[in-house]
Amino acid sequence: MMTFINFPRRIASFQDELKNAGIDVLVGTKLKTITHMSGGFVPWRSVVIVPAEGEVQLITSLLDAGRLKEESWLDNVVGYGGLPGMDFLDMISLRINELGLAKGVIGYESGTSNYLPDGFITLYEYEQLRERFPDATFRNAVELMDRFTLVKEPEEIKLMRQATAICDTAHEEVHDALRVGISEKEIAGIAEAVMRDLGSQFAWTFTGGQEIASGYRTWWFWGGCTPATDKRVQCGEPVMIDLHGMYWLMLGDVAHNAIMGRPSLEQREVIDAYTKVCYKVVEEMQPGRSLAEVTRNCNAFVQENGWGEWVLPGYGHGIGHFGHEWYPCVAEAESPGNNEPDYVLEPGYIQMIAVICNRPGVAGFRLERPLLITETGNEVMSNLPFEPWIIDCGRDCSRAP
C-alpha cells in the first residue's frame, strides 16, 4: 500500500516558511524535522541542513549513510564519524560554508518536551556552532516544523489509516489469545508478531514497544505502566493493551482494554465513567474549537459526574510520522513544547485522543485512538469499540479484586 508523497513540493513549501521567517538555513536536529525532510527512517543522531534556497542535505552516521542514500528521497546524504574533519559538527560546518551562509541567519531547534527522543540541539553543539560562525546570526526556529506538520498531507492520512488498521488487527488477535495465566510479555509478543506480519516496520514507542498492563499495574497514577512484565493475568483483573506500529514512517497507536471475567459492580462503575468520557472527547473534538475549549468542556463533564478523582484532566497528544508524537497535548494550561491550548482544530489535523480513567484497587483503563478532524466534524480512525472487552475465563470472578 505504498503511496506517492511529493517530497519536492513538501520541501519547497517548508523553504517558503524559512524565507518568511527570515532564516537562511535551518540546522534541523529534531527527529520530526529529519523524518519530514528526508523521508527516511533515521535512528542515529543526525541533522538535515535545509537552506531557504538550494539542496537539502542529510548528515547521518557513517554506518547508516549507505542505507539512507538508497531509502530516503534525498540525493545529498553524507556520513559523519570519528575521522579527522568528519565529526558531526565538522560536517555541519562544511555544508554551511558550501552554501555560502557563514554570515547568514542560522536557524536551530531548541526547546523542551516530555518526549525523550525529540532531538533538540545540545548545548555543546550550539556553542560550537556559534564559535565556528562568529559572524552569523542564530535564531531558534523550533516552532516552524511543529506548525508545518500539524495538518497532515492527504497521503499521510492514507498511510495513517493503514498503520491504525495494523494495530486494530493485532488487538483482535490479542483478544482471541487472552486467558488467565498469560503474561504481559506474551501479550506484547503476540501483538508484535501480528503487526510485523502485516507490514509494521518498527515498534516505535520509547516506553517499551507494546505497552501491556494487568491488575494493579493498570491503575497506577496517571496510567504509567511500561514496559510489559512477567506478571501473569488473573481472573477478575483488567488488562490494558496499548499497541504501536509504524507503516512507511506513519505511527499507529491504539490502546484498548479488557476485563477477565464478569466485572464486579465497582468495575462496572469505572467502565461506565471511562466509556462516557471517551464519547464526550469525540463529541467535543470539532473543527473551529481550540484545544483549551475541548479540555474545559471535558473536564466540566467529568466533574459534573463526580469522576474527578479517576479521570486524568488531559485528553490526547499529537501523532504523525516517526518522531512526531506527543505535541500538542489536549490540555488547558500552556506548556512550551507540550501544550498549545489556543490551537484551533482544522481539517486534516490528527489528534491522538486519550482518556486515562483509574480507580486504585478496582481497575484502570486507557484509550488512545487517532482522530481526524474533517470539514464537518471528525472521524475516529480505529474501528475498535470504546467499551472494554469482557473475556470469559470460565468461572465467576466478579468478586475478585
Image (cartoon, helix red, strand yellow):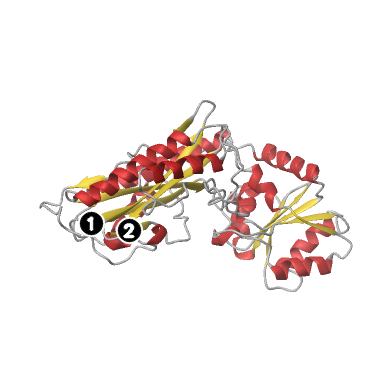
Q: Which mark is residue 218?
A: 2
Residue 96 seen in the current view: yes
Which mark, residue 237?
1
Give the camera-side residue of 17 and 261: 261
Q: Residue at x 39, y 51 (%)?
A: 308
Describe residue 96's horizontal placement relative to residue 331 as left or right. right
Q: Residue at x 28, y 46 (%)?
A: 271
Q: Residue at x 11, y 51 (%)?
A: 394
Q: Are marks 2 and 1 in contact (CB under 8 Å)?
A: yes
The residue shown at (38%, 63%) is 227
Amino acid type, callout 2: Thr
Q: Using the image as rendered, state which of residue 133 and residue 291 is in the foreground.
A: 291
Occupied quadrant, residue 79: bottom right
- The local secondary structure at tag 2 comes to helix
Residue 65's place in the image compared with 368, above or below, is below
Foreground of the two, 235 or 101: 235
Percent of width and height locating residue 210: 38, 56
Residue 138: % across, % down: 81, 58
Q: Amino acid at mark 1?
A: Glu
Secondary structure at numbered mark 1: loop
